[in-house]
Amino acid sequence: MVGRALVTAGLLMLGFVGYQLWGTGLSTGAAQADLKAQFAASLQPTTTEVAVVTTEVPVTSITTTSAPNSDSSTTLAPEMAGPTTTEVERQVIPEFSSGDVVGQLVIPSIDVDFFVVSGVGVKELRLGPGHFTDTPLPGQLGNSAIAGHRTTYGQPFHDLDQLEAGDDIVVTTAFGTYTYEVRDLKVVEPTDYRVVSTTDPNIATLTLTTCHPKWSAAQRLIVSAELIELESDRVLPTETVANEPTEESATAIAPSESSTSASTATTLPADTLTTATEMLGAEPSEPASTPDEPSAGTSQSEQAFSAGWFHDSTALIQALIWTATLIALRVAVTQVSARRKSWWPMLPISLAPAVIGLYFFYVNVNNLVPPNL
């Protein structure tokens, strides 16, 4: 009985390894095919908004003299000139829901080509690499961070340690293509979540994270890269407009048909728009939150970054339930076959329930391993 138990345990372990290496890859491959179709649809011309801001420009007082040697002069009171209209172009950046495709990640030197989704939870990383929602999007100023599996679910970051300084990382989104150059690689502890935060909000950087070493979640491998502006499209703003026009300052806000038609508008700098708002006596609105400010998804992303073994307590209970189910099925088949003195027809009949039970057993055991493994 001990020998049979050990042989059964060994076969279950081999089956689990096969599920991890190939079974999870099949599910990720199917998910990537769906994400490819979604991404193709998102590449349609993006929409921008054009705000028409009307301001009254005051004229300074003018002093005139009647003759060169005359002391008489006339001072004209300040007057308001005619209205000045300026069009403000604002890029409309949609909010991504959990699991939505964000862009395509390509690393030519290690043959990586995956579509990135929004979120770094267990469910999101099963679809492909995930974008930390509390960091800027690729192409924005600040540090954009992406996590991915090392040995399971398609192994998107399996060879991440083979990158060298100077290698290119290309991220394509609905707003453009952005090329980053690898700066350095380092290994940190799972609690060092600050590696994905923005240290310089004036430059666009990219950080890739995964578990380290392979087949372990003891540490995290971090790849840092910086945007090559000459090889990339225009950097996206971290916020659409610094100060929203009020009803008194905005006469009309009309959406354009595409980004091409809106590109003819003149972009008004944030400080100019602030000045125009103050001239009209309107209260400036609060600026949008920056990537450095904590958001609702910060704690969830940090937990996913530092999660280790047995992070899903419910999966352990379900794994034990499916273990008991498989043992009960095994005992029933053995007893019935012993009475009939033949494995026929119990063996083929029990094959389908055994495969289904094994699948759910492996799924729940897999939920106990680190999310980035």
Image (spheres, helix red, strand yellow):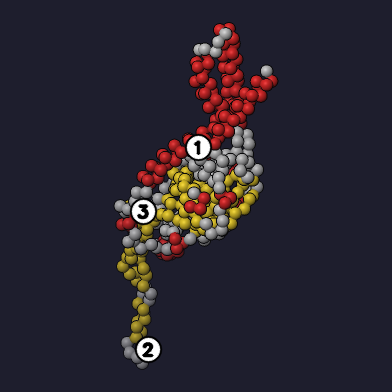
- In the rendered image, the quadrant that contains the N terminus is top right
Residue matched to label 3: 48
Mark 2 or mark 1: which is in front? 1
Residue 2 figure quarter: top right
Question: Which residue occupies 60% across, 27% down?
Answer: 12
Residue 303 figure quarter: top right
Q: Secondary structure at mark 2?
A: loop
Question: Which residue occupies 36% across, 68% down?
Answer: 57
Residue matched to label 1: 25
- In the rendered image, the quadrant that contains the C terminus is top right
Question: Which residue occupies 52% across, 50% down?
Answer: 110
**Upstream in the sequence, badge 2 or badge 3?**
3
**Upstream in the sequence, badge 2 or badge 1?**
1
Residue matched to label 2: 71
- Disc tally is 3
What amino acid is found at the position of numbered circle 3 in the picture? Thr
**Upstream in the sequence, badge 1 or badge 3?**
1
How crowded pointer 1 is (Cα within 10 Å; few <14, some 14-19, many 20+) is rated as many
Residue 118 rendering spot, x and y as whole percentages: 48, 44
Residue 17 rendering spot, x and y as whole percentages: 58, 33
Toward the viewer: 130 or 168?
A: 168
Q: Secondary structure at mark 3?
A: strand
What amino acid is found at the position of numbered circle 1 in the picture? Gly
Q: Secondary structure at mark 1?
A: helix
Residue 372 rendering spot, x and y as whole percentages: 57, 41
Mark 2 or mark 3: which is in front? 3
Measure how far apart labels 2 and 3 are at the Cα level.
58 Å
How crowded pointer 3 is (Cα within 10 Å; few <14, some 14-19, many 20+) is rated as many
